[in-house]
């Protein structure tokens, strides 16, 4: 018997993707200075980072990291449940629980692992998981890992979500949604989804990776802005590598939820804990994100400036009031060429294409941060105007 060779098949698939102009490529960044990055000797003004509050290079975070590293070393050396759970981890979990108004919080190494672990712990084979079609890939993968029956509803369509819940009224059900959608930048209809879950006896889970730190009076995220509490959204996940400028993720909720995840979330149990120095730096970031409201105020001002300028230019911006401002161009090649043209002008804006977004919805994913200045936004608008994208057909 001649089996197909797995590596040969992978090589063929990679070639096919390259031929379709859809191949992903690594870019090495050699230096970062505020909103500027250096790549292949070229200094570029970046509009593609998720460091929304500009905290990644803050000197206070760096000092907190150094102090903790001096005291505790670099790696944690073990999983949390063996001997890797340090004081820094416990203090960060307490700060995150307080910020999000939850009883407790639990750290994970990445957001992907957090979502996989939560769904694998909560859902059993054949139980119902209802999700928005634009949810992040890790939410979809989490449902599949759990062996759940995955039902997807059209983006932000609460009535369609209700129909999917009605497809099985006997099974336990989890409804999962992004808070802020990573490619479109819009916000889920959380109040309506929470009310639906209450009526239907389903559990609501929100992935607020792109909302935490950015939205709400003290940056507590899209759930807090919607006026929802733990009883409305029993499972809240958010990441630490975006607005907080660090790395990792957490799940927050009741003590019963966290105790259950410690027992059954395999991606928590069998993973080395994050470096204690990283936890210390992140706790500093939480404090700054909560107390330095000028970062959100500046970011919102830049968002309004950009959207106003884009509207005046007739650019095909998607509706978003968050830091994610997608410029919808439709054709993948056109998006690539626009990205290349901007790079030639000293601006780094990434083209997003299939399979990350559906066919015909390629876009420039523009992100703004508190590290940008008004002159940077104006420079971007001027460059976009020169590309004559206003007549882009989608």
Image (tube, rainbow, N blue to C red):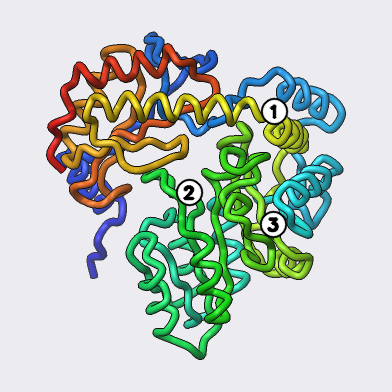
Residue with the mark numbered 2: 180
Q: Is residue 347 visible?
A: yes
- Residue 280, by quadrant, is top right
Which one is in front, 42 or 163?
Answer: 163
- Residue 351, by quadrant, is top left
Of the image marks 2 and 3, the number of the one nearer the N terminus = 2
Q: Residues within 10 Å of mark 1 (few under 14, many from 20)?
A: few
Q: Residues within 10 Å of mark 2 (few under 14, many from 20)?
A: many
Residue with the mark numbered 3: 252
SS at mark 2 in the image:
loop
Q: Disc 1 and disc 3: Cα gap in Å? A: 23 Å
Q: Quadrant of the N terminus?
A: bottom left
Q: Position of residue 383 (x, y in %)?
A: 27, 16
Which one is in front, 139 or 227?
Answer: 227
SS at mark 1 in the image:
loop
Q: Disc 2 and disc 3: Cα gap in Å? A: 17 Å
Up the image or down, 310 lies above or below 136; here it is above
Of the image marks 1 and 3, the number of the one nearer the N terminus = 3
Marks 1/3 in contact by CB < 8 Å: the verdict is no
SS at mark 3 in the image:
strand
Up the image or down, 341 lies above or below 114; here it is above
Q: Position of residue 360 (x, y in %)?
A: 18, 47
Q: Quadrant of the C terminus?
A: top left
- Residue 367, by quadrant, is top left
The structure residue drawn at horizontal position 48% and vertical position 68%, both measured from the top left corner, is 143
Residue with the mark numbered 1: 292
Of the image marks 1 and 2, the number of the one nearer the N terminus = 2
Mark in front: 1 vs 3: 1
The structure residue drawn at horizontal position 57% and vertical position 38%, both measured from the top left corner, is 214
Mark in front: 2 vs 3: 2
The structure residue drawn at horizontal position 82% and vertical position 40%, both measured from the top left corner, is 88
């Amino acid at each position: 018997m001649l089996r197909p060779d797995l590596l040969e098949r992978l090589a063929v698939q990679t070639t096919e993707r390259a031929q379709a102009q859809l191949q992903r490529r690594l870019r090495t960044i050699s230096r970062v200075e505020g909103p500027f990055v250096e790549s292949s000797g070229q200094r570029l003004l970046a509009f593609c980072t998720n460091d929304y509050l500009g905290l990644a290079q803050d000197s206070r975070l760096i000092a907190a990291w150094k102090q903790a590293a001096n005291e505790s070393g670099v790696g944690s050396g073990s999983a949390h449940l063996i001997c890797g759970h340090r004081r820094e981890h416990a203090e960060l979990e307490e700060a995150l629980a307080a910020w999000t108004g939850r009883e407790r919080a639990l750290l994970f190494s990445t957001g992907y692992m957090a979502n996989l672990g939560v769904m694998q712990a909560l859902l059993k084979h054949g139980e119902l998981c209802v999700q928005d079609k634009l949810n992040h890939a890790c939410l979809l993968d989490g449902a599949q890992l759990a062996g759940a029956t995955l039902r997807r509803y059209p983006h932000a369509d609460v009535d369609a979500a209700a129909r999917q819940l009605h497809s099985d009224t006997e099974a336990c059900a989890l409804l999962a949604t992004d808070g802020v959608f990573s490619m479109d930048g819009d916000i889920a209809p959380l109040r309506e989804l929470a009310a639906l879950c209450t009526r239907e006896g389903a559990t609501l889970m929100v992935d607020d990776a792109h909302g935490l730190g950015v939205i709400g009076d003290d940056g507590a995220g899209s759930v807090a802005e919607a006026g929802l509490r733990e009883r409305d959204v029993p499972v809240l996940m958010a990441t630490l590598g975006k607005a907080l400028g660090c790395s990792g993720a957490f799940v927050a909720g009741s003590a019963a939820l966290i105790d259950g995840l410690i027992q059954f979330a395999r991606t928590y149990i069998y993973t080395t804990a994050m470096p204690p120095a990283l936890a210390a730096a992140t706790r500093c970031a939480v404090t700054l994100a909560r107390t330095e409201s000028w970062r959100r105020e500046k970011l919102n001002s830049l968002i309004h400036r950009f959207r106003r300028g884009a509207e005046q230019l007739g650019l095909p911006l998607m509706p978003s009031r968050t830091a994610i401002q997608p410029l919808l161009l439709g054709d993948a090649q056109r998006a690539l060429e626009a990205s290349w043209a901007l790079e030639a002008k000293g601006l780094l804006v990434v083209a997003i294409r299939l399979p990350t977004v559906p066919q015909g919805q390629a876009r420039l994913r523009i992100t703004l941060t508190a590290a940008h200045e008004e002159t940077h936004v104006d420079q971007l608008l001027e460059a976009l105007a020169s590309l004559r994208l206003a007549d882009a057909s989608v």
